Image: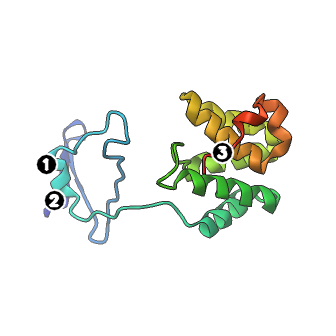
Amino acid sequence: LDHRRRAWIEERQKAVVVGPRTLFIATTNTGSRYVGAGPLDAALDERFTRIVEMGYLSTKEEQDLLTRRVPGLDAKYIEALTEIAAKTRQSSSNIRALSTRRLLAAAKDLQLYGEESLEYTMLNQCSDPSERSALAALLVGKFPSILSDLNVSAANTRSPF
């Protein structure tokens, strides 16, 4: 990754030369939100001199992505999932933000197995009981037919927002 654009590979006893228009892209989760994540080693950090911070897709972009990746899923489900995700990403939320990856899994399972699958793709990711209850309230608000499946009482389904 340095100016020489080559690396000696001892096991192969030869140099690997990087082409002139080759670009390396790396990703990392850094910061206190990620267990076990720490600062990059200084030497490695020096090799990646351009940093692009990525946020979440907009609700519309996320809806478009889910529509493309899970063709045939009812638009009302896509809208409901992305609205729930947006609410978890608000600073006032006491629920861990739902990732686009988690939404995609939920959408695929929703299409294959129905609404009850949301318990497994979304709720069971919450180990904290208050977080689970708050997410259950959001889910029941958009997917009322799963109320009995979640065994959530009406008293526990008030939205935290």
Q: Is mark 2 on a helix, strand or loop?
A: loop
Amino acid type at circle 1 is Ala
Read off the residue under disc 1: 43
Please give the name of the residue rendered at 60% of the width and 51% of the height, measured from the top-left corner. Answer: 161
Q: In the figure, is residue 132 to the left or right of 56?
A: right
Amino acid type at circle 2 is Asp
| Of the image marks 1 and 3, the number of the one nearer the N terminus | 1
Read off the residue under disc 3: 105
Read off the residue under disc 2: 2
Real-space Cα separation, disc 2 to disc 1, in angstroms: 11 Å
Q: Position of residue 128 (x, y in %)?
A: 54, 29
Q: What element carries label 1?
A: helix
Q: Is residue 153 visible from the viewing direction of this image? A: yes
Quadrant hosting residue 83: bottom right
Q: What element carries label 3?
A: helix
Q: In the figure, is residue 63 to the left or right of 71?
A: left
Cβ atoms under marks 1 and 3 closer than 8 Å: no
Foreground mark, 1 or 3? 3
